[in-house]
Amino acid sequence: MTLEKLTSKNWFPITERVPVYAEHLNVVIDEINNMTDGGSEFDTISEKTAGAGVTVDGLKIIDKGIDMSTALTGEFDINLPDNVASALDIKESTNSYLKFTTTNAGEKIVAGKQLQTINGTVADPAIVSTASNSGVFFSSGIAGFSTAGSHYAELTGDGSFQVYTTSSTGGIKSISGEVCPLIPVAAQNEIAINGAIILTNFLTTINSTDGALSLTLANGVVVGQLKKIIFRVDNGDAVVTGNFTGSNTTLTFSDAGEYALLQWNGTEWIALELGSVLNMTHAPVIAGAV
């Protein structure tokens, strides 16, 4: 007896157990209930031979599992519905482990639990494609992490670790607050007129040949930035205005040879060293407003 014969309109209702071999499926219909006009509903499809499983076009359903090992390339696909918030959700009770969203323009795969790889590698997965977004990103051999694009750090292909920030409070810090010293790589310069001391290099010398100078030092570019200032020629004091140690606002050089080694901590320039290359008793003075 074939399955087609059994499901014809002449065979309903059937409420008893009727084993029927369906040769085109190679299965036994173990229980058939609630046959209605125009169709049928099968409560159970069971193995023809115990332990052999049920095979339908290369998909084998076995006890507590699915075996697709016999399917060839392209023979087995899982097709999800389009434009659905939860097209497929793999759950344990109400706990979602992996959910597929096919919403138009919002397609994504949501991992509801922690992902873990064992000795695995990931090649440019573009978790976040650019440093302008929040999160971890991999792009063109660069690994990094970002906070809303304002600040981000990269480990580049040449082995260098780079930090980018739009704030003078950004930089490299330890958990306990110590900062990593950062030195701009640029040639020294000299200033001999009133104006601003540049921050794009490490060393600036001061020359007051034409008389006393009024200078300014802006806030550091990044936490940890080092700046060194040497009073090279003295023909009048040089007063530098800025944010210095202890909420002070001026740094005054009065004798040739005096120098200041400063480090930006995010809010003020800390005086790491004040001294003189010519006289051990001389040093520039940090003070309040004058």
Image (spheres, rainbow, N blue to C red):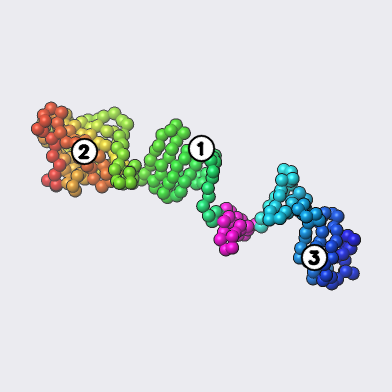
Write the start and end of the magenta stretch as one range. 82-109
Calculate the distance from the C-alpha at mark 3 to the C-alpha at mark 1. 58 Å
Q: Residue at x 29, y 28 (%)?
A: 187
Q: Which residue is mark 2?
A: 272
Q: Which mark is residue 31?
A: 3
Q: Is residue 85 above or below residue 36?
A: above
Closer-to-camera residue (99/139)? 99
Mark 3 and mark 1 lie on one chain; the one further toward the N terminus is: 3
Where, by quadrant of the figure, is residue 152 drawn? top left
Q: Residue at x 50, y 44 (%)?
A: 129
Amino acid bearing label 2: Leu
Amino acid bearing label 1: Ser
Calculate the distance from the C-alpha at mark 2 to the C-alpha at mark 1. 40 Å
Q: Residue at x 18, y 43 (%)?
A: 241
Residue 276 seen = yes
- In this rendering, which labeled residue sits more in front, label 3 or label 1? 3
